[in-house]
Amino acid sequence: MKVYFYFHVLCQVVNVLASTNSNNKGSLESCVQNVEHMETSFIKDLCKSNPDLEEFMIAADILIRSDCALIDSCRRVVEQPHDDHDEVDFIVVGGGVAGPVVAGRLTENPNWTVTLLESGPEQPAATDIPALLSSAIATKYDWQYSTTPQKNACLAYGGVCGWPRGKVLGGTAVLSGSMYSRGHRDVYDGWLRDGNVGWGYDDVLPFFKMSENNKDYHTEHHGNRGPISVQKPTEILPITRTLMEAAQELGYEEIDMSDPEPMGFSIAQLMMSSAKTRVTTPTAYLRPHLRTRSNLRVRTNSHVTRLLVAADRRSVYGVEYVDGSNRTRRLTARKEVILCAGVIGSAHLLMLSGIGPAEDLRPLGVPVVQDLRVGHNLQHHVASKLTFQLNVTNDRLLSFDTIGQYMKHRSGPLSTTGGLQTSAFLRSNRAGPAEPADVQLFFDGYSPNCAYALPVFGGQCFAATAPVVMNVRPVNIRRAEPGAPPVGERRPVRPAAHRSQLPGRRGGRGRAGVGTAAGQRPGDAHQGAAEAGRHRRPEARRSVQPARVRNRPLLEVSDPVPHSRREPSRGHVQDGPGLRPDRRRRPRAARAPSPRRPRGRLVRVPDPAQLQSHRARHHGGREGRAFYQEHVALTRDSKRRYF
């Protein structure tokens, strides 16, 4: 039986290769061999629960490695020898989203030498295919962090949510949906009002335009000469058209998500090339220059473990890192060390180097260089799902016909991100009629990707909508060892805050049962406010969105350690240490201080008696337990990964 299985796979591969031979310029012999990005075997394990899809993924693995245009070996990072006495002008720590931009821009000056250090390997070629956008989650390309046990969220997952972070050149963008958006004008102008000079909308717009090569819009708000290719997918799925028609019936306009004042629904633009491959910042800012700029070095599999702090404890002159052969090395900088290791990685590295809260570092035996509140202003988002029953499944979008269509013409379902095409900016019940949108919706789950498909019950697929809200929680270190994962103590909004958002949530459900969308109805079990409240807590999970920029007093690292700075990201960057849309409308001076935050602490920790009472009021009792048990049973019976 197994022999027949692999023989059938081979026959299908031969058929696809025969049909795509004329489109595949060159051959494997003309590509660079034995490089990391050709390692695509991880995708073969994504669909083992379904024999038909397992067969498809094995064939996809073979076909991807046979397509030199997709592999693009001549523009990939190749391991270079390390020099223990090496010194450069700039060291960029982290090759995720911001790091490649910083390194690429700095090396435009031929007199500056730059080395970028990335903990993970090169981006695998399989993730360049839009439909396989989440195939690297929970693999070696993912740090696979998780939160500490939560009281009001992640209840469907035992109180602990996964927190994917990219351990790969390209960072978490390699694991995400490639959606391109900027945020409302008022967000940036709010940063300017807070004292962040140079971060108003009119200040950042030239940088948006400079980075962007927009294929669809030619307005004053978009650029057409930048390195990042942006366009709408050419393959629009039926569910996407249905959603847009339903939105128009409800009076919402189709918008450009990057408009200065977005309000409505949109088929989102993707960071995608004309060849229908995903674009990341290494694609745009590093690969074109790897063979032409002698002042640019990119070292993958190089995990930075410590910053080298000068004797005066006020400057950083280099880094210590472990290379791919597990050998500890040093690299020094004549000018600057720039941290671009992400919202978690940068704080983690600073604390391992002794720059952080003394009360956290001393018990772990870490010598304190600067006693600063590093990691105690983590700005993140929580997303809550709404489930809808559809009368179609998404598995049939993965077939030998569709992969042949993509390999030959770069078209078909594999050339798009599926349900992730659609998003919306709306006002919740808390926003006034003249205020900007304060809720963003994502339509998730209906995509040609078995690795990220939502559960299928009774042969019918579920999709999801995710309202996004803010939460704040510290990041800390467990142990002094660099290999120990950090503690991400995310705190989703309190139950009272959940209830304040519920009218908008119920409105989303009500609108889903109107007109064109009436056939895709929400589950009847979660229609009211109380039901929605109970549903949100088990379903609350992580969401990757920009974080807020705060002015200099909260970025204290910039003052006592002037040569070690965190590079703030520019708009299109989703995974940066310092960006977050600020939905607060009043000036800081006009707001009364929160009674819940005692002086000197960011987060109040309730005593056990208060916590027990809180749990009993908000998600205890027979009704809450019954819902939770029912949800867990559905998840278990689905026999699929449930995100």
Image: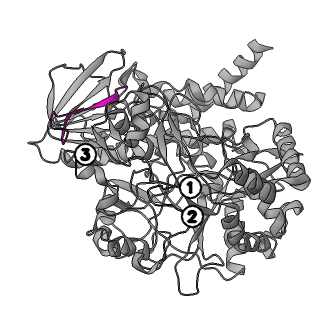
The number of callouts visible is 3
What amino acid is at disc 2? Arg
What amino acid is at disc 1? Arg
Q: Are marks 1 and 3 in contact (CB under 8 Å)?
A: no
Does the magenta run of residues contain 215?
Answer: no
Decide which of 325, 592 is in the foreground and name it: 592
Which residue lies under the disc numbered 2? 596
Decide which of 9, 557 is in the foreground and name it: 557
**Is residue 341 at least partly visible in the picture?**
yes
**Residue 533, percent across and down?**
77, 62
Decide which of 636, 598 is in the foreground and name it: 598
Does the magenta run of residues contain 308?
Answer: yes
Task: Name the residue rendered at 54%, 75% in the picture.
Answer: 255
Mark 2 lies on a secondary structure that is loop
Locate the C terminus by quadrant.
top right
**Residue 521, percent across and down?**
83, 64
Q: Which residues are magenta?
A: 301-317
Which residue lies under the disc numbered 1? 604
Q: Residues within 10 Å of mark 3 (few under 14, many from 20)?
A: many
Quadrant location of residue 350? top left
**Residue 567, percent across and down?**
30, 51
Q: Choose mark 1 or mark 3, whichever is in front.
A: 1
The correct choice, above or below, for 425 with respect to 470 in the image is below
What amino acid is at disc 3? Gly
Which residue lies under the disc numbered 3? 104
How far is mark 2 from mark 1, CA to CA? 7 Å
How far is mark 2 from mark 3, CA to CA? 44 Å
Question: Disc number at residue 424?
Answer: none
Q: Is residue 215 left or right of residue 643?
A: left
Quadrant location of residue 527? bottom right
